[in-house]
């Protein structure tokens, strides 16, 4: 009998007993190949000696000091390193303990910015359907996944949701990728105008959509047009790179590949690589200046802001990524991985789409390829694939509700950057076997 309030209350998960590199071992001695880095968290795999040494050294030196009294050397070093490698114009880093906290902080920073500059009438956020920004109330409010929002909808702040960039399902046959991107940006502009002049605080979007839609890569030009729309209306652009940032797509920030610079960017998972809970918001100078020249204070805060051991882990993770040339490796091996996935899964009658970038891939499953018809949600195909893959020793990250929060199934893959090509091939093969085994069963559609 467990006293842990587990995610699911009618079944207890197996006990993870140890982990090294690409592998997690359970208490029964079974090994699992970690093809999703948990939830796209582990960039360096498990047990990296440099990160562990940095954490040990920090624990011996200074495990904790509250940020209302002190800063710490390691938080300063991490912020320097993050600003050194940040999108242009970012001047400060707000260090929190995870992705949802980063998103909450960004939403409040954006709101306070407008209060500071004399535009308190800006009260509304716009985000996208099928997005995921975290489970705390502000993050859930901007999140666009209907299933996650539904029980809490009456207590969420109002937000408008526009279409995601989802070419597989929503780009029309008679429009180019550029025209599709423009149509989406036009929808955003109409949503901003519908609120009335000067009412919208920010547009919030994952640069590459992750958990709830199965890796949606933006069409070329989409984010540039979005940036122009935001600028035209004085609306901030908050990019949520909690999942897709920190090298996951082959550049440190996914927005580098879109040629846009956000006003605020959130990062988390790959920042600490799973060694410590840590997240951050990077802010453009104009936002920091508005506060420093105004109230002089960001009206927010948590007990564990800038936690020294978390900062030490994150700094070590970032240093290893740069020292070992892992961004270039993710770019190169990411192409190879994509080809492996297409080869292993692309012709399967129930694989509708294989999409992604770097070490961030989504496989969308369909009952009927030609019509892109999703499986009956009652079949819970995604859960069956997770279970089948687990039984074969593969950890992947499948979800349902891909299409609209209810229908659709996908599998998300996000292997650690240290994965060898042999590991990547094993992942593709094991996943293809799992998908084949599950879709071949006569379970009702
Ligand atoms: C894009 C994005 N934002 C925010 C979050 C929330 O992060 P956390 O689970 O660390 O609170 C997630 C988690 O999956 C995410 O993918």
Image: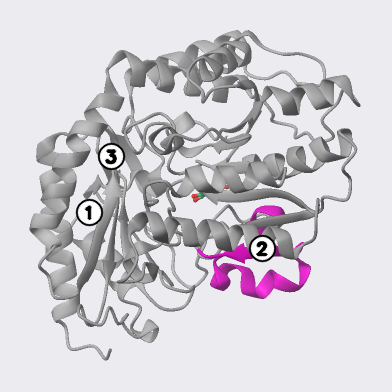
Mark 2 residue element = helix
Residue behind label 1 places its C-beta within 8 angstroms of ligand 1: no
Residue 290 figure quarter: top right
> Does the magenta-highlighted stretch encompass residue 156?
yes
Q: State left or right for residue 213 relative to residue 353.
A: right
Mark 1 residue element = strand
Q: Is residue 17 visible?
A: yes
Front label number (2 vs 1): 2
- The foreground one among 57 and 261 is 261
Which comes sooner in the sequence, label 1 or label 3?
3
Q: Position of residue 92 (x, y in %)?
A: 66, 21
Q: Residue at x 42, y 42 (%)?
A: 244
Q: Position of residue 325 (x, y in %)?
A: 27, 19
Query: Which residue is denoted by mark 2 in the rendering?
Result: 191
On residue 358, the disc is 3
Furthest residue in direction bottom, as rendered: 444
- The foreground one among 222 and 411 is 222
């Amino acid at each position: 009998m467990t006293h842990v309030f587990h995610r699911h209350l009618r079944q207890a998960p197996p006990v993870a007993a140890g982990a090294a590199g690409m592998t997690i071992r359970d208490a029964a001695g079974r090994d699992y190949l970690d093809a999703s880095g948990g939830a796209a968290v582990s960039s360096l795999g498990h047990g990296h000696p440099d990160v562990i040494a940095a954490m040990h050294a920090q624990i011996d030196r200074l495990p904790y000091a509250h940020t209302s009294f002190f800063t710490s050397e390691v938080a300063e070093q991490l912020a320097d390193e993050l600003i050194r490698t940040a999108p242009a114009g970012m001047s400060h880093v707000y260090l929190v303990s995870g992705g949802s906290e980063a998103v909450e902080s960004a939403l409040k920073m954006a709101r306070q910015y407008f209060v500071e500059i004399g535009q308190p009438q800006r009260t509304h956020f716009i985000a996208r359907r099928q997005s995921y920004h975290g489970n705390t109330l502000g993050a859930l409010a901007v999140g666009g996944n209907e299933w996650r929002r539904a029980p809490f909808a009456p207590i969420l702040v109002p937000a408008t949701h526009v279409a995601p960039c989802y070419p597989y399902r929503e780009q029309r046959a008679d429009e180019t990728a550029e025209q599709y991107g423009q149509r989406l940006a036009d929808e955003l502009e109409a949503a901003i105008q519908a609120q009335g002049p000067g009412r919208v605080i920010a547009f919030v979007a994952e640069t590459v959509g992750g958990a709830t839609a199965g890796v949606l890569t933006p069409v070329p030009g989409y984010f540039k047009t979005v940036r122009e729309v935001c600028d035209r209306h004085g609306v901030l652009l908050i990019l949520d790179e909690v999942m897709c940032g920190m090298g996951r797509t082959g550049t440190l920030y996914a927005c580098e590949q879109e040629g846009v610079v956000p006003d605020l960017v959130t990062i988390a998972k790959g920042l600490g690589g799973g060694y410590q809970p840590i997240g951050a918001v990077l802010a453009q100078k104009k936002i920091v200046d508005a506060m420093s020249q105004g109230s002089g204070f960001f009206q927010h805060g948590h007990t564990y802001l800038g936690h020294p051991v978390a900062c030490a882990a994150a700094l070590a993770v970032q240093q290893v990524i740069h020292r070992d040339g892992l961004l270039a490796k993710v770019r190169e091996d990411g192409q190879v991985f994509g080809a492996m996935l297409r080869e292993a899964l692309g012709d399967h009658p129930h694989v509708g789409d294989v999409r992604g970038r770097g070490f961030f891939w989504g496989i969308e499953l369909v009952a009927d390829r030609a019509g892109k018809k999703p499986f009956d949600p009652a079949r819970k195909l995604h859960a069956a694939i997770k279970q089948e893959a687990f039984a074969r020793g593969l950890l992947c990250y499948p979800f349902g509700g891909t299409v609209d929060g209810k229908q659709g199934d996908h599998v998300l893959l996000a292997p650690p950057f240290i994965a060898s090509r042999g590991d990547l091939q094993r992942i593709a093969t094991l996943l293809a076997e799992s998908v084949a085994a599950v879709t071949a069963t006569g379970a009702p559609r």
